[in-house]
Amino acid sequence: MDQKKVTIIENAIKLFARKGFSSTSVQEIADECGISKGAFYLHFKSKDVLLYELFEYYWQRIQQRVNKITSEPLQPREKFVHQLKVTIEEVANHREFIIMQIREQVIPFNDTIETFIKRMRYHSYLFYKNHLLAIYGEAKRDYVWEASSIVQGLLKHYIDLIIMDNFDVDYHKLALAIMRRVDYIMEGFEKHNDQPVITEAIMNQIIPENIKYEQLEDIIDILMKIKEHETDREILDTVDVLLEELKKEDYRQAVIKGMASILEKHEEYMDVASQLRSYFI
């Protein structure tokens, strides 16, 4: 996105947070940016288009930082803690975006934005589930969906405290604390032989198939990033086999399972192996 559009978005979000989306005019946005109304329309066809691109801009900012960590050679737990910290940091640094959503939550957004928000939510469901599966392993698969929902609830509440009540906390320590809470939950399931309310079968009914295809694109992106920095011949060969197999409509499950097993020998690639198993196996 070009810098002029970014400038308009960042000024608009401040106005939306202060006055609300509906009460803010295009002229006010233009004045805030020091441009003419006509210049605004050169970049955005309407205020609704601006709002959609605003959501997309902030979502992509967070995703770019989080995905960069995904390809780093870290253990799954360390990687997830880092991603939690980055998520909190990005949201705290753009608090106007959250304040706007809180202000506007009683006003329905247009259908395009509603669809985009649903996609973000479905991707978040899969993101947290896949990372917890990588951390706790297949033996805890029955519990990861419920645990991921609890993580998201905790994260949302802490972010609300940071944004709305100026809660001052070290983001890395907060991410570690959330991770420990998940440990207690997973231990509790086993200790008490408890059964989750949110199961894989339920979530498979909720998340549309096309979102899972988008998850496949994410897996391919991660594999391509691994190729950029990895020097281990076994890993490189494994990634090449996977990329070739993922091109096929009629993929061979046994091949993907075998390649996932090789990646699982290396702790830093447990998360992508988990995503492969979740998607294909």
Image (cartoon, rainbow, N blue to C red):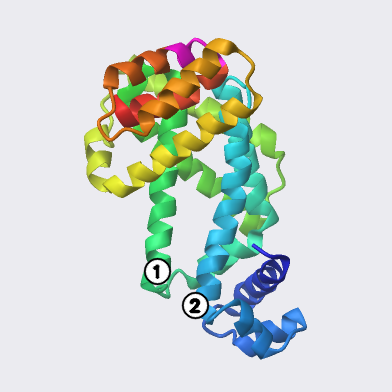
Mark toward the start of the polypeptide (2 vs 1): 2
Q: Which residue occupies 56% across, 78% down?
A: 20
Q: Is residue 7 magenta?
A: no
The CA span between labels 2 and 1 is: 9 Å
Q: Nearer the viewer, residue 189 or 247?
A: 247
Q: Which residue occupies 62% across, 21% down?
A: 74
Q: Nearer the viewer, residue 140 or 76?
A: 76
The three-letter code of the residue at mark 1 reads Thr
Residue on which disc 2 sits: 48
Residue on which disc 1 sits: 112
Tell me residue 194's x, y (percent).
Answer: 28, 23
Look at the numbered disc 2 and give the secondary structure of its residue: helix
- The answer to whether 25 is drawn above or below residue 113 in the figure is below
Look at the numbered disc 1 and give the secondary structure of its residue: helix
Q: Which residue occupies 53% across, 72% down?
A: 51
Q: Which residues are magenta?
A: 262-267
Tell me residue 11's x, y (percent).
Answer: 70, 73
The three-letter code of the residue at mark 2 reads Asp
Tell me residue 255's x, y (percent).
Answer: 33, 17
Residues at marks 2 and 1 touching, judged by CB atoms closer than 8 Å: yes
Q: On the rendered structure, is 258 left or right of 20?
A: left
**Residue 44 location, quadrant:** bottom right
**Residue 4 location, quadrant:** bottom right
- The answer to whether 71 is drawn above or below residue 101 in the figure is above
Q: Is residue 265 magenta?
A: yes
